[in-house]
Amino acid sequence: MSSLDIGIDLGTANVIITLGGKGIVINEPSVVAYDRKKQEVVAVGLEAYKMIGRTPEYIVAVRPLQDGVISDNDMTEVMIHEFIKKVKGSVVLKPQIILCVPSSVTDVEKRAVIEAALSAGSRKVWLIEEPIAALLGAGVDITLPGGKMVVDIGGGTADIAVVSFNGIVHSESIKMAGNKFDASIIRYVNQKFKLLIGEKTAEMAKKQITNVFDPDGSRKMDAKGRNLVDGLPSRVEITDIDMEKALREDVSTLISAIKDVFEKTPPELVGDILVNGIIMTGGGAMLGGLPQLITHALRVPCYVADNPIECVARGVAKAFSCSDQLLDGFELVSVYKYK
């Protein structure tokens, strides 16, 4: 692996970048702050994230990736360019880049990602699918026969895949992940307490007090926002029971998607997964009680990989050294001709 090789986990919530043998060098929110008056980018990443909900009307903090795909090409190009510039510093040479994409990404979406990387100054670009990268990052040997199932829950999508002999046997990608969880919490608090809370408050509740398996009301926090009845500032106490109710439908959708993958997987591989268990990666894997709920609902052992948020990024870095072994989910992008 060259010292200039750059691996990018281009996530809906966060961008994680690895460089050569240094490992992870950037882990920042996928946010761009844009000044409409001056028509220029004000900040990218963490600095832009701090501006969400706190800017005048002419400055907008946008997430250029929605549900795991690029929704704003221009802002994504700017974001990737700024991050690569941070990593490269004053180095003039063009790097090789591996970009991670969801397993269900379309050709159009692939091209948008590739063009963003090429315009940012890369020499060569590869794509790797999230399930492959997640398993590599979790330390799983995907070259061996036998089924391995990974559930990678990011900010925009949850990728569920069965892998054997280097290849993806079956996979599904659903738009049910961290951002949807936040939206469900906001909606629940809105409906039950008539309180409008912000995205950051919902995310904090999700991380700190959620228990979707056996909530007992012991985990609590104050949620502050605007009262929808009188319009004044207000606060309420929410518990892990509230979180379970808010996320019940979302979690059921996720479990149903895992069941669908099982139904389309050869029985021999299903037997392997029963022994090996389900590996969970991504920030959503840390949702309180989720592994236990999946184990209970599917009667299959389920565990969270070490440092699940960085699994995909670590897998992308490993992919440089084993590109010749990867069959599915890994491709040289030179097949696309750009003008």
Image (cartoon, rainbow, N blue to C red):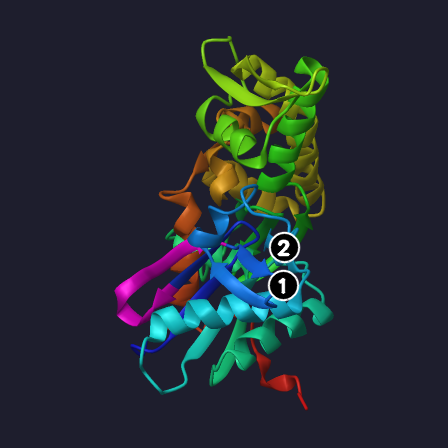
- Which element is circle 1 on? loop
Residue 156, percent from left and from top: 62, 48
Residue situated in front as seen by the camera: 197 or 80: 197
Q: Residue 37, which numbered label?
A: 1
The residue type indicated by label 1 comes to: Lys
Which quarter of the figure has residue 70? bottom right
Distance from disc 1 to disc 2, alpha carbons, whole Å, reads 6 Å
Q: Main secondary structure of the magenta part?
A: strand
The span shown in magenta is 18-29
Left or right of 211 in this view: 249? right
Q: Quadrant of the N terminus?
A: bottom left
Q: Quadrant of residue 184?
A: top right
Tag 2 or tag 1, which sits nearer the N-term?
1
Residue 215 coordinates in the image, percent (x, y): 52, 13
67 shown above or below 220: below
Whether the residues at callouts 1 and 2 have beta carbons within 8 Å, the answer is yes
How many neighbours does mark 1 have within 10 angstroms: few (below 14), some (14-19), or many (20 or more)?
few
**Residue 243 in the image: above or below residue 291:** above
Check residue 103 in the rendering and tell me which mark sits there, or answer none: none
Residue 243 position within the rendered picture, expressed as x and y whole percent measured from the top left: 58, 20
Q: Residue 142 lies in magenta, yes or no?
A: no
Q: Amino acid at mark 2?
A: Tyr
Query: Residue at position x 60%, y 27% from top?
Result: 197
Res 141 visible: no
- Relative to 55, say whether 7 is above or below: below
Q: Position of residue 41 (x, y in %)?
A: 53, 65
- Of 233 and 166, nearer the camera is 233
Mark 2 packing: few (<14 Cα in 10 Å), some, or many (20+)? few
Residue appearing at x 50%, y 47% in the figure: 51
The residue that disc 2 covers is 58
